[in-house]
Amino acid sequence: MNLFQPEHKNTSLNAYVGNNPWVDINTHITGYQSATIVMLDTILGSNYKQYDGAFSWCNDTSIYPILFCARHFIELYIKQKIYAINFLKLKQDINEKLIKTHDIRKLWKMFVSISNETKDYRIEEFIDSLKPYIDEFGNIDPIGETFRYPYSQDNEKHLLNFQCIGIYNFSKKFKDFSKICGGFTHFMDYLVDEYRVKTFTKVLSRSDIEKIAKKLPTNQEWKNFSFNNIKNEIKKEFNISSNELTKAINIIKGHIEFKQYLYPEVYELPIEKNKLVLFMNETFKESDIDKFSFEEIACLRAICEIGTAFMNVRYYSEDYFWLYKLFLEKYKKGNYYEFKTDYNCIIYNIYRIKLGIEKLNYIHHIQ
């Protein structure tokens, strides 16, 4: 007998585990959350239907695997989000702490702590939404024993303070909680992309720095007395010191997108502004390829790329530089086919280039 052998004939019924590239903690999180929902729905819609081979599938027997799966989903979810938040910019050594504890209350404390250390108010906004659900599970089953065993390690019976648990009530609220978790997961995916471009300080995110850039006057107005008032208002709004504001301004000054708020006249692309305007007005045709240098095509191709939206790709203006370098190096290696293909690509994707120019905050240069 081999209970865990694979299906050799009907391979569509194999479940892939172990050393497969798509199997990770997210697979487990999704599995336990989905199993909870499926079990709840079978009970709420079954009218005590019995399943082939099942000893008994009813309210009193199903509640334990349902709540165990829900609780284990929460434990894994918090752990994964601690890893994800830590990955953004702190990058502390937290592996041992996470592996050693299954206590939801301790994990939640770590989650809140690392969120506060990251100093991104957008993460902190989710804490209030998640906390009531985490607290309830932390109180009823802090270490994952309550729904697995009838007795604790101290031989005390579990759930003595509960006469019954409403399955419909739990189902409704767990689904509400799952929506919050799904929203936070989606938002964390967004933040991972944002922090990837490394535009942040110890206390300010890229989003904060962009907001500050928009609040600052143009460089020509900095000598005015009102500039000090504006800086003081910014420091108060973002709760930062003068030193932190100076760091943010220095980042803005060197940022391809944000510097345009301070220096709107600055134009630093390797294609002349007039030529870019002509290109955007669709003046050039396929036959005009010889009128463009490698640098100009690499520039336009990079702008086209950051103006392109894919499901799993989110570009920022910072991505322009490595994309430009990537395309330029290909052309300089003598790959004329790539050069011609990319030229045709930009000729027929003016709209995407416009979106890319908007990301660079250069739109005013072509209007």
Image (cartoon, grey):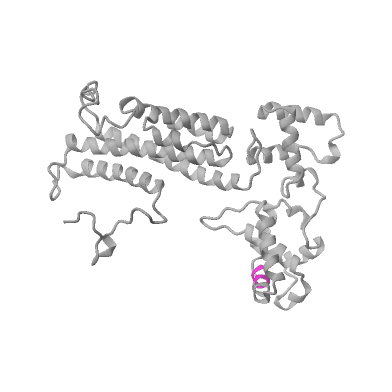
Q: Quadrant of the C terminus?
A: bottom right
Q: Position of residue 352 (x, y in %)?
A: 64, 61
Q: Is residue 26 visible?
A: yes
Q: Nearer the viewer, residue 220 or 16?
A: 16
Q: Position of residue 24 (x, y in %)?
A: 40, 49
Q: Is residue 50 above or below residue 64?
A: below
Q: Is residue 155 above or below residue 264?
A: above
What residue is drawn where x is 17% and y is 36%?
61
Question: Total of numbered circles in the picture?
Answer: 0
Q: Is residue 42 above or below residue 276?
A: above
Q: Quadrant of residue 271?
A: bottom right
Residue 343 in the magenta stretch? The answer is yes
- Bounds of the magenta segment: 342-346
What residue is drawn where x is 37% and y is 36%?
74
Q: Nearer the viewer, residue 344 or 102?
A: 102
Q: Position of residue 124 (x, y in %)?
A: 53, 32
Q: Quadrant of the N terminus?
A: bottom left
Q: Main secondary structure of the magenta part?
A: helix
What residue is drawn where x is 79% and y is 43%?
262
Q: Nearer the viewer, residue 120 or 288?
A: 120
Q: Quadrant of residue 63?
A: top left
Q: Is residue 281 visible?
A: no
118 sits left or right of 216 in the view: left
Q: Position of residue 145 (x, y in %)?
A: 27, 31
Residue 2 in the magenta stretch? The answer is no
